[in-house]
Image (tube, rainbow, N blue to C red):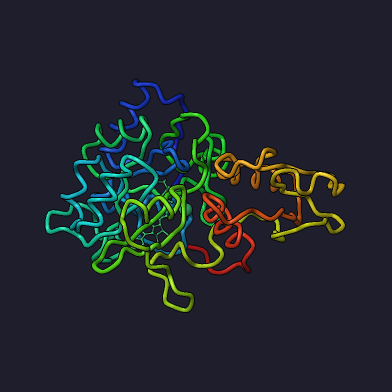
Amino acid sequence: MPQFQRQTRLAPANPQAIAEAAACLRAGGLVATPTETVYGLAADATDERAVAAIYAAKGRPRFNPLIAHVADAAAGREGRLDDFARRLIEAFWPGPLTIVAPVAATCRVSLLARAGLDTLALRCPDHPVAQALIAAAGVPLAAPSANRSGRLSPTTAAHVAADLDGRVDWILDGGPARRGVESTIVACLGGAPRLLRPGALTSERVEAALGVALDRATPGRAPIAPGQLASHYAPRARLRLGARRLQAGEAALDFAGALADAGAAVRLDLSPSGDLDEAAARLFACLRALDDDGAARIAVAPIPERGLGAAINDRLRRAAAPREDDV
Ligand code: TXA
Ligand code: MG
């Protein structure tokens, strides 16, 4: 029997289910939980076996550092927070911002969850179910997105079940994820904070709170967030970005009706009214729906780069990139 074969319980995230799922976490189990960004696959970050089970369930080919999800107050115990990190926590936690900091001497997060690094990614999710799980488990929770490796991040419990049924112990259903794209990751490791991954919190807001410009990842520099590798968020279909007209056989992923008259057999609009927050929330669900429909090629309308458009375009570029060894 493969090691990941498990009896998966899928239930609405009510207090009873949360309590049972938290007990399961304390015993080393795997629990898929809603967060405000995407669904996460949580395990006790201090327990190497539980963390190893995350990689097995996702089918990740190699270890990649995971975000430790903490209660606001616990962050200083796990990571060494400089003034920039404190300012960001003050301004945005709980919320869709992950901070990478040097590991503190009191850090409980296992080496495996950190992939051996002496830095640590910390996040305090703005979701009552995730917060209740963290509080009841009493330990930081390692939680990557709750999808099979190489598939899109899940924004509903049904997406999680499609990928991980039989591989995890619990799936807590908290309805569709409000934000729909992953957290923004900022490294505070001395010097100017560095943007490692654009995400659900715009870099404009981060910079306004910091009072300094973010250092940006430079192309050609080795990625320090493996999620920066090109083809990470991949649907099965091939994507063509910035499309203004359709080619034969393409399905359309539209924005603000730009491709409405293009004659696509299948067309989904991320936001007919041109609202980038709505587009971010619907991005992964729309890509999944087009994939499930059997589209071989998807033409994607241009998405403006302002606000959450930066995170949306980042995910689309990765999804369109030639496939690499997946992380
Ligand atoms: O919104 C989110 O952040 C979701 C929800 C579930 O919280 N989680 C998520 O986790 O997106 P994951 O594992 O799919 O992405 C974590 C990213 C990876 O790109 C990883 O390389 C980076 O965080 N990361 C983790 N620890 C790091 C570290 N010490 N230094 C640099 N990057 C790190
Ligand atoms: Mg992921």
Find residue 95 and report its horizontal and vertical position in percent: 36, 42
Q: Which residue is at a point 77% across and 43% down the rendered structure image?
A: 267
Total residue callouts: 0
Query: Looking at the image, is 167 positioned above or below residue 310?
Result: above
User: Which one is nearer the viewer's eye here, 99 or 2?
Assistant: 99
User: Which one is nearer the viewer's eye here, 132 or 26?
Assistant: 132
Quarter containing ligand 1?
bottom left
Find residue 97 and report its horizontal and vertical position in percent: 37, 49
Find residue 203 and report its horizontal and vertical position in percent: 43, 55
User: Would residue 1 be seen by someone viewing this image from the given angle?
Assistant: no
Query: Looking at the image, is 191 positioned above or below residue 83?
Result: below
User: Which one is nearer the viewer's eye here, 89 or 124?
Assistant: 89
Instruction: Spot the residue most to the left.
Output: 105
Q: Which residue is at a point 20% across and 55% down the rendered structure image?
A: 79
User: Which one is nearer the viewer's eye here, 6 or 251?
Assistant: 251
User: Would residue 78 be seen by someone viewing this image from the given angle?
Assistant: yes
Decide if residue 199 is on the left or right side of residue 103: right
Q: Which residue is at a point 29% across and 42% down the rendered structure image?
A: 28
Determine which quarter of the picture holds residue 24: top left
Find residue 251 and report its horizontal and vertical position in percent: 78, 50
Q: Which residue is at a point 53% across and 68% down the rendered structure image?
A: 325
